[in-house]
């Protein structure tokens, strides 16, 4: 007796099949979102670097004026805060560069490992504060897509040298993933 609640793709005696490569077709979307996120993080990293430099210069000027309201030597405090901002900027730049590179590679169904690393780097985005919520959302969505067996298959086709269009054509045509 046939199960009326059974998926139409799962017929008795057949392996589970996928029509249209649903999850794998989302890889280019995740790749573009990785590049957008990387660009935003690059901008925030630049702002952190600018803030650190400004902080160091302003406190050095304050030290030259002899303002007694700062507990540490203003020059020491300024350079310490400048270093903190510089480290935040550096961490944000590294994470942004990883996302930009991985997104560029993943758009053509290459570098799945780079993509997973870039998505996981969303946790490091907490350093940039502003980019963390979107990085976390992208990490969850992207890992759901990239850890899917369809995505693994699509990336393997891309790594074998097929172009992005050829992989998409196979995803649309092949029902034996």
Image: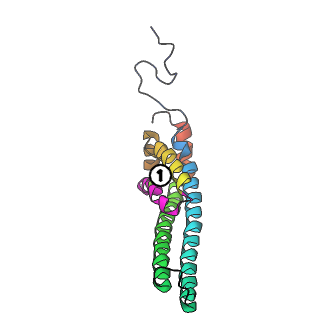
| Magenta stretch, overall SS | helix
Q: State the residue at coordinates (45%, 78%).
A: 80
Q: Is residue 122 magenta?
A: yes
In this view of the protein, which residue sits in the foreground, 60 or 138?
Answer: 60
Give the farthest residue toward the top. 1
The percent coordinates of residue 62 (x first, y second) are 57, 86
Which residue bears the numbered disc 1? 158
Res 65 quadrant in image: bottom right
Image-quadrant location for residue 64:
bottom right
Q: What segment carries the magenta color? A: 113-131
Specify whether residue 160 is in view.
Answer: no
Q: Position of residue 135 (x, y in %)?
A: 52, 54
For the point 53% across and 82% down, the residue is: 56
Residue beneath the point at 50% across and 50% down: 136
Quadrant containing the N terminus in the rendered view: top left
Q: Is residue 98 magenta?
A: no
Vertical placement of residue 53 versus 13, above or below: below
Q: Where is residue 106? Give x, y as percent.
A: 50, 55
Instruction: Judge by depth and name the residue closer to the eye, 62 or 39.
Output: 62
């Amino acid at each position: 007796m046939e199960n009326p609640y059974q998926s139409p793709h799962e017929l008795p005696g057949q392996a589970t099949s996928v029509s249209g490569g649903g999850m794998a077709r989302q890889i280019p979307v995740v790749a573009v979102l990785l590049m957008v996120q990387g660009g935003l993080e690059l901008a925030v990293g630049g702002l952190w670097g600018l803030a650190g430099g400004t902080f160091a210069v302003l406190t050095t000027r304050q030290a030259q004026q002899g303002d007694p309201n700062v507990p540490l030597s203003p020059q020491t405090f300024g350079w310490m805060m400048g270093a903190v901002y510089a480290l935040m900027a550096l961490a944000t730049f590294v994470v942004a560069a990883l996302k930009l590179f991985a997104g560029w590679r993943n758009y053509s169904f290459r570098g799945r490992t780079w993509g997973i690393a870039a998505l996981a780097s969303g946790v490091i985005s907490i350093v940039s504060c502003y980019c963390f919520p979107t990085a976390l959302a992208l990490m969850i969505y992207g890992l759901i897509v990239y850890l899917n067996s369809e995505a693994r298959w699509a990336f393997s086709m891309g790594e074998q040298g097929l172009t992005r269009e050829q992989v998409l054509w196979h995803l649309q045509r092949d029902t034996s993933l």
